[in-house]
Image (cartoon, rainbow, N blue to C red):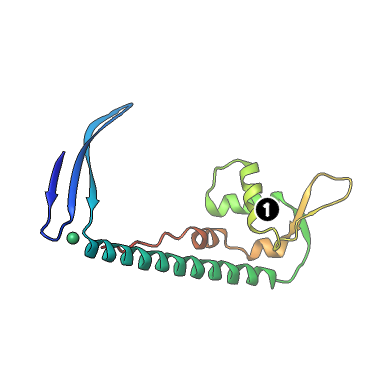
Amino acid sequence: MSEIRHECGCVYTEVEIDVDRPFMCYTDWETFVRRCPEHQEEFERKERQENERREQERLKREEAIEAYLQTVRDTAHTEFVPMQYAIDRFRHSMKNVNSKSWIQDYLRRTFNDVLMFQQKRHRCRVYCCKSKVDAIDFKHFWNLQNTQYRTTRG
Ligand SMILES: [Zn+2]
């Protein structure tokens, strides 16, 4: 353990940590900071700014997703096809190897009010709207959902 005291009153303590996991065994350091009032205030102000920025980005992302879904909603309905059609298209455009039920869940969850899912009476197959499936660029949509904004810190 080593301690660095700054003139302002901030204390940085470095603590040795033994990482002992299968195939991994090394010594790491973790820094704990006890800040002086002035730097604590600055730290909290930066945290608030960072949270606000993240919130703004979350809103922007949700707006982009909603706008995209709206273009699919606005696509005219043509015919119903078995849901397998959407699963195949998703798999193909995403080069996705997840299980059928995973993709099915994702599609139901994500495009529930968009793809007009229907379960015909007395049949277990689920149907959806072909033209709306065709209107979706799954890869683009996935990227909209999962954009990682870089964090600017310090
Ligand atoms: Zn300080």
Closer to the camera in the image, 129 or 12 = 12
Q: Is residue 30 left or right of residue 144?
A: left
Q: Residue furthest left?
A: 7
Q: Is residue 109 above or below residue 45?
A: above
Q: Residue at x 37, y 66 (%)?
A: 48
x and y percentages locating residue 55 in the rendered image = 46, 66
Residue 129, given in percent of the width and then of the height, sits at: 74, 61
Graded by Cα atoms within 10 Å as few (under 14), some (14 to 19) or many (20 or more), the crowding at tag 1 reads some
Front-most of residues 99 and 18: 18
Quadrant for ligand 1 reads: bottom left
Q: Nearer the viewer, residue 145 or 76?
A: 145
Where 115 falls versus 71 (above or below)?
Answer: above
Is the C-beta of the residue carrying label 1 under 8 Å from the nearest atom of ligand 1?
no
At label 1, the amino acid type is Arg
| Quadrant location, the C terminus | bottom left
Q: Residue furthest top?
A: 22
Task: Tally the marks.
Answer: 1
Quarter in which the N terminus is drawn: top left
- Which residue is pictured at 36% across the width and 68% down the height? 49
Q: Residue at x 45, y 60 (%)?
A: 147
Q: Residue at x 76, y 68 (%)?
A: 77
Check the image and report above or below for 71 versus 103.
Answer: below
Q: Which residue is mark 1?
A: 108
Find residue 125 and report its horizontal and vertical position in percent.
Answer: 79, 46
Q: Quadrant of residue 23?
A: top left
Residue 96, position in %: x, y? Answer: 54, 47
Q: Nearer the viewer, residue 69 or 48?
A: 48
Asked if residue 22 lies left or right of residue 82, the reply is left
Report helix, strand or loop for mark 1. Answer: helix
